Image (spheres, rainbow, N blue to C red):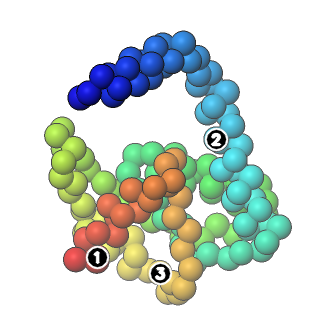
Amino acid sequence: MDKYEKELLEKIKQSAKEMVVDRVELGELRLKRLVAMIYLLIKEKQERFDLLVGGGNSGIAVLEIVKMVYQKAGVDVPPIVLFPVIRPSNEKEVNFDKSLTARQLKNIKKLNRLLFVDDFVKNFHNLYINLRPRLA
């Protein structure tokens, strides 16, 4: 690391110490954005999905929120599937329980459009982890 990189790193560390993030406000904002986006899709744009999909522990919570939006909007809730992602302690490998997903998908009669929801889909990491076993 040269002197400029060291100087930049020190400035970043100092800025981080001075930065204050209101996590409650941030959480509320993200929840409102999720609800607004789902409402826009299903009520205003009248998009219809054959399946709602979530992944991992956070997916359980997000799927429940999406389900509530559907119910409040008066729109039939499509079938829901949770892809169970199990991360070992080192988090380098990801285990995927295919048997549970197969049982959940067994009764799906039509699957043209699905809506994948999660608390962090910005870089599609969870979606990639869930699809990787099928792409291999």
**Residue 94 location (% of width, % of height):** 22, 54
Name which residue lies at 69% across and 69% down. 76
Q: Amino acid at mark 2?
A: Arg
Which of the two discs, 3 and 2, labels the residue nearer the N terminus? 2
The residue lying toward the viewer, choosing from 19 and 96, is: 19
- Between discs 3 and 1, the one toward the N terminus: 3
**Residue position for label 1:** 134
Image: 95 above or below 42 = above
Q: Residue furthest front?
A: 3
In space, the residues marked 3 and 1 are separated at their CA atoms by 18 Å
Q: Give the side of residue 42 with respect to residue 101, left or right.
A: right
Q: CA distance from mark 1 to mark 2?
A: 30 Å
Residue 36: x percent and y percent?
Answer: 74, 52
> Under tag 2, what secondary structure?
helix
In the displayed structure, 49 sits above or below 31; it is below
Q: Image quadrant of residue 39?
A: bottom right
Residue at the spot of label 2? 30
Count of marks, rendered view:
3
Amino acid found under the numbered disc labelled 1:
Arg
